[in-house]
Amino acid sequence: MGDSYGAGIGAGHMIQRFDETCFRYDGAYPVILEANLQPRPPRFNFVACSGDKFPAILQSQFRDGPSSLGRPNWGNRPEFVTLSMGGNDIGFKELVSVCIYSIRIFTLKDCAEVIADSQRRLADPDLVRDAVNVISTALRKGSSRSGPNFKVYVTGYAQFFNEQNLQCNFVSLKPSWSPFARQYLTIDLRQALNKIARDLNAVLQTAVMRANIGAPQRVFFINYDDLFEGHRFCDREEPNPNDPERWFFTLGSNEAEIGQFLNSIPRISRLLNGRRDEPVSDQEFFRLIGEAARGDERKRDNGVAAFRIMHPKPLGHRAIEGRLRAALFATTRRISTGTTDNPIQTS
Protein backbone atom coordinates (compact mmCIF):
# COMPACT_ATOMS: atom_id res chain seq x y z
CA MET A 1 0.00 0.00 0.00
CA GLY A 2 0.98 3.62 -0.19
CA ASP A 3 2.56 6.11 -2.54
CA SER A 4 5.00 6.17 -5.48
CA TYR A 5 7.83 4.77 -3.35
CA GLY A 6 5.68 1.70 -2.74
CA ALA A 7 4.48 1.64 -6.37
CA GLY A 8 8.10 1.74 -7.55
CA ILE A 9 7.58 4.36 -10.23
CA GLY A 10 10.26 4.01 -12.91
CA ALA A 11 11.81 0.83 -11.45
CA GLY A 12 11.71 -1.81 -14.15
CA HIS A 13 8.63 -2.05 -16.36
CA MET A 14 5.16 -0.71 -15.75
CA ILE A 15 2.56 -3.35 -14.97
CA GLN A 16 -1.23 -3.25 -15.23
CA ARG A 17 -1.07 -1.04 -18.28
CA PHE A 18 -4.81 -0.55 -18.23
CA ASP A 19 -4.28 1.70 -15.24
CA GLU A 20 -2.50 4.90 -16.29
CA THR A 21 -2.98 6.63 -12.94
CA CYS A 22 -0.92 4.65 -10.40
CA PHE A 23 2.26 3.78 -12.31
CA ARG A 24 3.15 0.54 -10.57
CA TYR A 25 6.40 -1.10 -11.69
CA ASP A 26 7.68 -4.65 -11.49
CA GLY A 27 10.94 -3.59 -9.82
CA ALA A 28 9.14 -2.19 -6.76
CA TYR A 29 10.15 -3.67 -3.41
CA PRO A 30 6.69 -5.20 -2.70
CA VAL A 31 6.91 -7.15 -5.98
CA ILE A 32 10.43 -8.38 -5.17
CA LEU A 33 9.35 -9.29 -1.63
CA GLU A 34 6.44 -11.39 -2.88
CA ALA A 35 8.78 -13.34 -5.14
CA ASN A 36 11.16 -14.11 -2.26
CA LEU A 37 8.62 -15.47 0.22
CA GLN A 38 8.04 -19.15 0.97
CA PRO A 39 5.43 -20.34 0.83
CA ARG A 40 4.42 -17.92 -1.92
CA PRO A 41 1.37 -15.91 -0.92
CA PRO A 42 -1.76 -17.30 -2.61
CA ARG A 43 -2.61 -13.77 -3.71
CA PHE A 44 -0.53 -10.61 -4.01
CA ASN A 45 -2.48 -7.36 -3.95
CA PHE A 46 -0.41 -4.45 -5.28
CA VAL A 47 -2.49 -1.41 -4.34
CA ALA A 48 0.20 1.29 -3.90
CA CYS A 49 -0.55 4.29 -6.11
CA SER A 50 1.80 7.07 -7.19
CA GLY A 51 0.72 10.45 -5.89
CA ASP A 52 -1.59 9.18 -3.14
CA LYS A 53 -1.76 11.10 0.11
CA PHE A 54 -3.36 9.92 3.35
CA PRO A 55 -6.98 10.65 2.24
CA ALA A 56 -6.53 8.87 -1.10
CA ILE A 57 -4.99 5.84 0.60
CA LEU A 58 -7.98 5.62 2.91
CA GLN A 59 -10.46 6.14 0.10
CA SER A 60 -8.99 3.96 -2.64
CA GLN A 61 -6.58 1.41 -1.18
CA PHE A 62 -8.91 -0.43 1.21
CA ARG A 63 -11.34 -1.61 -1.46
CA ASP A 64 -13.02 -4.99 -1.25
CA GLY A 65 -14.16 -5.12 -4.85
CA PRO A 66 -13.30 -3.91 -8.34
CA SER A 67 -12.51 -0.23 -8.79
CA SER A 68 -13.51 1.99 -11.67
CA LEU A 69 -9.83 2.97 -11.84
CA GLY A 70 -8.75 -0.63 -12.20
CA ARG A 71 -7.06 -0.66 -8.80
CA PRO A 72 -6.78 -4.13 -7.24
CA ASN A 73 -8.52 -4.92 -3.98
CA TRP A 74 -7.33 -6.30 -0.68
CA GLY A 75 -8.42 -9.92 -1.00
CA ASN A 76 -9.98 -12.19 1.58
CA ARG A 77 -7.36 -13.03 4.22
CA PRO A 78 -4.34 -10.72 4.11
CA GLU A 79 -1.36 -11.88 6.16
CA PHE A 80 0.49 -8.56 6.32
CA VAL A 81 0.72 -5.23 4.53
CA THR A 82 3.63 -2.95 3.65
CA LEU A 83 2.88 0.75 3.75
CA SER A 84 4.80 3.73 2.31
CA MET A 85 3.20 7.08 3.06
CA GLY A 86 3.71 10.69 4.05
CA GLY A 87 6.03 11.98 1.31
CA ASN A 88 3.23 13.50 -0.76
CA ASP A 89 1.57 14.91 2.33
CA ILE A 90 4.59 17.04 3.22
CA GLY A 91 5.32 18.12 -0.36
CA PHE A 92 8.20 15.91 -1.52
CA LYS A 93 7.47 16.46 -5.20
CA GLU A 94 7.40 20.25 -4.73
CA LEU A 95 10.70 20.10 -2.84
CA VAL A 96 12.33 17.97 -5.52
CA SER A 97 10.99 19.79 -8.57
CA VAL A 98 11.58 23.34 -7.32
CA CYS A 99 14.59 23.10 -5.00
CA ILE A 100 16.63 20.55 -6.99
CA TYR A 101 15.51 20.80 -10.62
CA SER A 102 14.12 24.36 -10.87
CA ILE A 103 10.91 23.00 -12.43
CA ARG A 104 7.58 24.55 -11.49
CA ILE A 105 4.67 22.33 -12.44
CA PHE A 106 3.19 21.39 -9.08
CA THR A 107 3.59 24.74 -7.33
CA LEU A 108 4.30 28.38 -8.12
CA LYS A 109 6.31 28.92 -4.92
CA ASP A 110 10.07 29.32 -4.71
CA CYS A 111 12.41 26.97 -2.89
CA ALA A 112 12.43 28.81 0.44
CA GLU A 113 8.63 28.84 0.51
CA VAL A 114 8.39 25.16 -0.37
CA ILE A 115 10.84 24.20 2.38
CA ALA A 116 8.93 26.33 4.88
CA ASP A 117 5.67 24.63 3.87
CA SER A 118 7.17 21.17 4.42
CA GLN A 119 8.58 22.18 7.79
CA ARG A 120 5.16 23.48 8.88
CA ARG A 121 3.48 20.25 7.83
CA LEU A 122 6.06 18.18 9.70
CA ALA A 123 5.47 20.23 12.86
CA ASP A 124 1.68 19.85 12.63
CA PRO A 125 0.42 17.19 15.12
CA ASP A 126 -2.23 16.25 12.57
CA LEU A 127 0.48 14.59 10.45
CA VAL A 128 1.12 11.95 13.10
CA ARG A 129 -2.62 11.59 13.68
CA ASP A 130 -3.27 11.03 9.98
CA ALA A 131 -0.50 8.43 9.76
CA VAL A 132 -1.88 6.62 12.82
CA ASN A 133 -5.32 6.66 11.20
CA VAL A 134 -4.04 4.85 8.10
CA ILE A 135 -2.10 2.32 10.19
CA SER A 136 -5.06 1.68 12.48
CA THR A 137 -7.39 1.24 9.52
CA ALA A 138 -5.01 -1.34 8.05
CA LEU A 139 -4.78 -3.14 11.38
CA ARG A 140 -8.55 -3.26 11.86
CA LYS A 141 -9.23 -4.43 8.34
CA GLY A 142 -6.49 -7.03 8.33
CA SER A 143 -7.26 -8.33 11.81
CA SER A 144 -10.97 -8.63 11.09
CA ARG A 145 -10.13 -11.07 8.30
CA SER A 146 -6.94 -12.75 9.43
CA GLY A 147 -6.98 -12.54 13.21
CA PRO A 148 -4.44 -11.16 15.70
CA ASN A 149 -1.36 -12.28 13.75
CA PHE A 150 -1.90 -9.71 10.98
CA LYS A 151 0.99 -7.22 10.82
CA VAL A 152 1.78 -3.83 9.27
CA TYR A 153 5.26 -2.81 8.06
CA VAL A 154 5.68 0.95 7.55
CA THR A 155 8.66 1.87 5.38
CA GLY A 156 10.47 5.19 5.73
CA TYR A 157 12.44 7.31 3.26
CA ALA A 158 16.13 7.73 2.46
CA GLN A 159 18.05 10.99 2.60
CA PHE A 160 18.94 12.24 -0.88
CA PHE A 161 22.39 13.75 -0.40
CA ASN A 162 25.92 13.40 0.82
CA GLU A 163 26.22 16.67 2.75
CA GLN A 164 30.03 16.87 2.82
CA ASN A 165 30.95 17.07 -0.88
CA LEU A 166 32.15 20.65 -1.55
CA GLN A 167 32.13 20.20 -5.34
CA CYS A 168 28.33 19.91 -5.25
CA ASN A 169 28.09 23.50 -4.00
CA PHE A 170 28.58 24.57 -7.60
CA VAL A 171 26.31 21.98 -9.23
CA SER A 172 22.82 22.60 -10.57
CA LEU A 173 20.53 19.90 -11.96
CA LYS A 174 18.30 22.42 -13.74
CA PRO A 175 17.40 21.16 -17.23
CA SER A 176 18.15 23.42 -20.17
CA TRP A 177 14.45 23.87 -20.93
CA SER A 178 13.56 25.37 -17.54
CA PRO A 179 13.44 29.21 -17.59
CA PHE A 180 13.73 29.55 -13.83
CA ALA A 181 16.82 30.43 -11.83
CA ARG A 182 19.29 27.67 -11.08
CA GLN A 183 19.20 26.04 -7.66
CA TYR A 184 22.70 24.99 -6.63
CA LEU A 185 23.21 21.95 -4.43
CA THR A 186 24.81 23.90 -1.62
CA ILE A 187 25.59 22.27 1.69
CA ASP A 188 22.82 24.32 3.30
CA LEU A 189 20.23 23.11 0.79
CA ARG A 190 21.36 19.49 1.04
CA GLN A 191 21.22 19.64 4.83
CA ALA A 192 17.75 21.18 4.78
CA LEU A 193 16.33 18.55 2.41
CA ASN A 194 17.99 15.66 4.25
CA LYS A 195 16.57 16.93 7.54
CA ILE A 196 13.07 16.90 6.06
CA ALA A 197 13.52 13.22 5.16
CA ARG A 198 14.80 12.44 8.67
CA ASP A 199 11.96 14.38 10.26
CA LEU A 200 9.38 12.51 8.20
CA ASN A 201 10.92 9.22 9.30
CA ALA A 202 10.61 10.41 12.91
CA VAL A 203 6.92 11.23 12.35
CA LEU A 204 6.29 7.77 10.91
CA GLN A 205 8.19 6.11 13.73
CA THR A 206 6.08 8.03 16.27
CA ALA A 207 2.91 6.93 14.47
CA VAL A 208 4.07 3.31 14.61
CA MET A 209 4.77 3.59 18.34
CA ARG A 210 1.33 5.07 19.00
CA ALA A 211 -0.40 2.41 16.92
CA ASN A 212 1.23 -0.24 19.12
CA ILE A 213 0.18 1.30 22.46
CA GLY A 214 -1.86 -1.05 24.64
CA ALA A 215 -1.42 -4.12 22.47
CA PRO A 216 1.25 -6.63 21.42
CA GLN A 217 3.50 -5.14 18.76
CA ARG A 218 2.03 -5.74 15.32
CA VAL A 219 3.24 -2.59 13.55
CA PHE A 220 6.90 -2.17 12.61
CA PHE A 221 8.84 0.78 11.21
CA ILE A 222 11.40 -0.20 8.58
CA ASN A 223 14.30 2.25 8.47
CA TYR A 224 16.51 1.64 5.43
CA ASP A 225 18.24 5.03 5.18
CA ASP A 226 21.63 3.62 6.18
CA LEU A 227 21.57 1.25 3.20
CA PHE A 228 21.75 4.25 0.85
CA GLU A 229 25.12 5.38 2.24
CA GLY A 230 27.44 5.67 -0.74
CA HIS A 231 24.52 5.71 -3.15
CA ARG A 232 23.19 9.25 -2.72
CA PHE A 233 23.55 12.37 -4.82
CA CYS A 234 26.95 14.02 -4.31
CA ASP A 235 28.64 10.84 -3.13
CA ARG A 236 30.73 11.31 -6.27
CA GLU A 237 31.35 14.20 -8.62
CA GLU A 238 28.19 15.74 -10.07
CA PRO A 239 26.45 16.13 -12.41
CA ASN A 240 26.61 12.54 -13.54
CA PRO A 241 23.13 11.62 -14.78
CA ASN A 242 23.99 7.98 -15.48
CA ASP A 243 25.94 7.20 -12.30
CA PRO A 244 25.31 3.46 -11.75
CA GLU A 245 26.19 3.73 -8.05
CA ARG A 246 23.49 6.30 -7.30
CA TRP A 247 20.22 4.65 -6.22
CA PHE A 248 17.99 7.64 -7.02
CA PHE A 249 16.64 8.52 -10.44
CA THR A 250 17.55 11.79 -12.12
CA LEU A 251 16.26 13.16 -15.43
CA GLY A 252 19.04 11.24 -17.16
CA SER A 253 20.79 11.87 -20.41
CA ASN A 254 17.56 12.28 -22.40
CA GLU A 255 16.39 15.38 -20.54
CA ALA A 256 15.95 17.27 -23.82
CA GLU A 257 13.47 14.69 -25.09
CA ILE A 258 11.64 14.79 -21.75
CA GLY A 259 11.35 18.56 -22.00
CA GLN A 260 10.11 18.34 -25.58
CA PHE A 261 7.35 15.93 -24.57
CA LEU A 262 6.27 17.98 -21.54
CA ASN A 263 6.21 21.14 -23.62
CA SER A 264 3.92 19.40 -26.12
CA ILE A 265 1.21 19.38 -23.44
CA PRO A 266 -0.23 22.93 -23.35
CA ARG A 267 -1.37 22.81 -19.71
CA ILE A 268 2.08 21.75 -18.52
CA SER A 269 4.00 23.86 -21.04
CA ARG A 270 2.45 27.09 -19.76
CA LEU A 271 3.66 26.33 -16.23
CA LEU A 272 7.10 25.19 -17.42
CA ASN A 273 7.53 28.51 -19.19
CA GLY A 274 6.57 30.73 -16.31
CA ARG A 275 2.83 31.27 -16.71
CA ARG A 276 1.16 31.60 -13.33
CA ASP A 277 -1.60 29.11 -14.05
CA GLU A 278 -3.11 26.84 -11.42
CA PRO A 279 -0.45 24.23 -10.55
CA VAL A 280 -0.97 20.66 -11.78
CA SER A 281 -2.01 18.01 -9.24
CA ASP A 282 -0.41 14.56 -9.23
CA GLN A 283 -3.39 12.80 -10.74
CA GLU A 284 -3.91 15.54 -13.34
CA PHE A 285 -0.25 15.21 -14.31
CA PHE A 286 -0.61 11.47 -14.86
CA ARG A 287 -3.86 11.95 -16.77
CA LEU A 288 -2.28 14.54 -19.06
CA ILE A 289 0.69 12.25 -19.70
CA GLY A 290 -1.60 9.35 -20.59
CA GLU A 291 -3.67 11.47 -22.95
CA ALA A 292 -0.64 12.98 -24.67
CA ALA A 293 1.16 9.64 -25.02
CA ARG A 294 -1.93 7.84 -26.42
CA GLY A 295 -0.39 4.40 -26.09
CA ASP A 296 3.11 5.53 -27.13
CA GLU A 297 5.28 3.96 -24.44
CA ARG A 298 8.29 6.15 -25.17
CA LYS A 299 6.26 9.31 -24.72
CA ARG A 300 4.67 7.94 -21.58
CA ASP A 301 8.06 7.00 -20.16
CA ASN A 302 9.32 10.52 -20.85
CA GLY A 303 6.44 11.87 -18.79
CA VAL A 304 7.09 9.39 -15.99
CA ALA A 305 10.79 10.40 -16.03
CA ALA A 306 9.79 13.91 -14.91
CA PHE A 307 7.97 12.47 -11.87
CA ARG A 308 10.30 9.63 -10.90
CA ILE A 309 13.23 11.97 -10.11
CA MET A 310 14.60 11.29 -6.61
CA HIS A 311 12.72 7.97 -6.42
CA PRO A 312 14.69 4.75 -5.87
CA LYS A 313 16.15 2.91 -8.85
CA PRO A 314 15.80 -0.90 -9.02
CA LEU A 315 18.96 -1.39 -6.90
CA GLY A 316 17.47 0.85 -4.24
CA HIS A 317 14.27 -1.19 -4.22
CA ARG A 318 16.28 -4.38 -3.85
CA ALA A 319 18.00 -2.93 -0.80
CA ILE A 320 14.67 -1.84 0.71
CA GLU A 321 13.22 -5.30 0.06
CA GLY A 322 16.17 -6.94 1.81
CA ARG A 323 15.70 -4.85 4.93
CA LEU A 324 11.94 -5.40 4.87
CA ARG A 325 12.33 -9.14 4.34
CA ALA A 326 14.74 -9.40 7.27
CA ALA A 327 12.13 -7.72 9.48
CA LEU A 328 9.40 -9.96 8.16
CA PHE A 329 11.36 -13.12 8.93
CA ALA A 330 12.14 -11.85 12.42
CA THR A 331 8.47 -11.21 13.21
CA THR A 332 6.73 -14.11 11.42
CA ARG A 333 7.38 -17.76 10.68
CA ARG A 334 8.04 -17.20 7.00
CA ILE A 335 11.25 -18.32 5.36
CA SER A 336 13.10 -16.83 2.41
CA THR A 337 14.07 -18.05 -1.04
CA GLY A 338 16.55 -15.19 -1.31
CA THR A 339 19.42 -13.99 0.83
CA THR A 340 19.98 -10.75 2.64
CA ASP A 341 22.88 -9.44 4.67
CA ASN A 342 20.92 -6.38 5.76
CA PRO A 343 20.82 -6.00 9.54
CA ILE A 344 17.31 -5.73 10.90
CA GLN A 345 16.16 -2.25 11.92
CA THR A 346 12.59 -2.12 13.12
CA SER A 347 10.70 -0.39 15.86
Image (cartoon, rainbow, N blue to C red):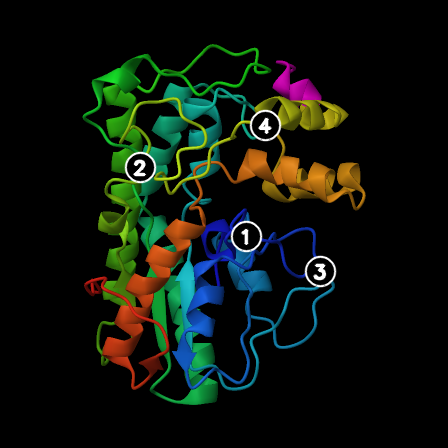
Disc on the earlier residue, 2 or 1: 1
Which residue carries the number 2 mark? 232
Q: Residue at x 35, y 27 (%)?
A: 116
Decide: is 308 above or below 236.
below
Separation of disc 2 and disc 3 at Cα?
A: 35 Å
Decide: is 314 above or below 76.
above
Q: Residue at x 50, y 57 (%)?
A: 27
Magenta extent: 269-278
Disc on the earlier residue, 2 or 4: 2
Depth check, mark 3 against mark 1: the one in front is 1
- SS at circle 1: loop
Q: Quadrant of residue 185?
A: top left
Which residue carries the number 4 mark? 254
- Residue closest to the eye, 64 or 309: 309
Separation of disc 2 and disc 1 at Cα?
A: 20 Å
Q: Amino acid at mark 4?
A: Asn
Q: Residue at x 44, y 12 (%)?
A: 182
Q: Amino acid at mark 3?
A: Leu
Depth check, mark 2 against mark 4: the one in front is 4
Q: Is residue 251 visible?
A: yes
- SS at circle 3: loop
Depth check, mark 3 against mark 4: the one in front is 4
Q: Position of residue 35 (x, y in %)?
A: 46, 73
Disc on the earlier residue, 3 or 4: 3
Q: Classify mark 4: residues with Cα within 10 Å, few (<14), some (14-19) or many (20+).
A: few
Q: Residue at x 33, y 56 (%)?
A: 319
Q: Residue furthest right?
A: 294
Disc on the earlier residue, 4 or 1: 1
Depth check, mark 2 against mark 3: the one in front is 2
